[in-house]
Image: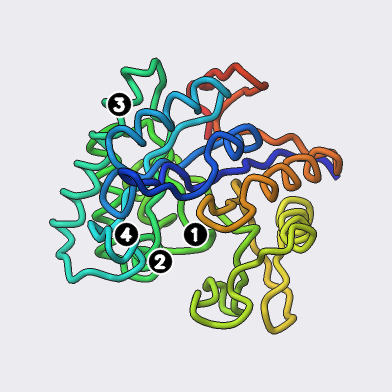
Amino acid sequence: MTGTIDLNADCGESFGRWTLGDDAALLQSVTSANIACGAHAGDPEVMRATARLCVTHGVAIGAHPGYPDLAGFGRRILPMTPAEVFNTVLAQIGALAALVKVEGGTLAHVKPHGALYNHAARTPDIARAIADAVAAFDARLILFGLAGSGLIEAGRAAGLRVAAEAFADRAYEADGRLRERALPGAVLTDDARALDQALRLARHGEVLCHDGTRLPLRADTVCVHGDTAGAAARARTLREGLQAAGLRVAAPGQDRDRGHSRRLLGAC
């Protein structure tokens, strides 16, 4: 079976003198990057440097806005109104886009981070606020969201192209939710198991859940978290394994080979 799948990574999550992950190595293997925008992680220097790496390696650049919660790494839901969510997402996209432009790149997509991503998946008002902010900034951007969730629906309703996302390095519950990080087995750190999950998603449209059940799940893009130990090596294993299985690994809406990318106008 042949097909196309995107391999994306959350990155640019260092801050000041604090370093998280190995973006220089990670970005040699993925086809899309979600760069933290300074709210849950990142700062202007890190954002710009990460954008520069993406341009160098021909990686599609995305904004990764989250709740403004550096102390909690954006993994706590903040009591923000939909209007506040709209404004913070819009501001974060704009900040990254400016730095990407200076480096000669173009913003291709937006993927919310952490608690904001999961909250939007099940809370229509938050999902609409995010989708509307993306559309207000640039309706040509692709919105990444949890496959089968309300964020995908909100993106379509806002007139955006969407990319249904699944995870190579996270366990799933039988209802399609990601397993809570505090629970055993929530994060998959074994490279072979992560590759098996990615191949199931890309070739068979399913995921093997934590309880052993098979869940149908169609995905356009598969994520590996840059802040997880061994992420760069895991991403390389995933890229090589997907290609070895006959899959084309490419960013959504782009004709891509290493070192070069071109937006396909009107691609869905």
Q: Is residue 188 above or below residue 68?
A: below
Q: Position of residue 263 (x, y in %)?
A: 51, 21
Determine which residue is flagged by label 2: 118
Rounded to the nearest angstrom, the CA distance separating label 3 from label 2 is: 27 Å
Query: Residue 51, image x and y in percent?
Result: 42, 28
- Image-quadrant location for residue 85: bottom left
Q: Residue 32 appears in which quarter of the rendering?
A: top right
Q: Which residue is mark 3?
A: 99
State the SS at label 2. Answer: helix
* Circle 4 Cα neighbour tier, 10 Å, few/some/many (<14 / 14–19 / ≥20): many
Q: Which disc number belongs to residue 98?
A: none
Choose between 89 and 99: the one closer to the eye.
99
Q: Amino acid at mark 2?
A: Asn
Q: Position of residue 47 (x, y in %)?
A: 35, 35
Give the residue type at disc 1: Leu
Task: From the viewer's perspective, tell me whether residue 233 is left or right of residue 142.
Answer: right
**Gap in angstroms between the C-alphas marked 2 and 1:** 8 Å
Q: Amino acid at mark 3?
A: Leu
In the image, residue 127 lies at what x, y percent?
Answer: 32, 59
Q: Residue furthest front?
A: 17
Whether tag 3 and tag 4 are in contact, CB under 8 A, the answer is: no
- Residue located at (44% from left, 24% from top): 52
CB-based contact (under 8 Å), mark 4 and mark 1: no
Q: CA distance from mark 4 to mark 1?
A: 11 Å
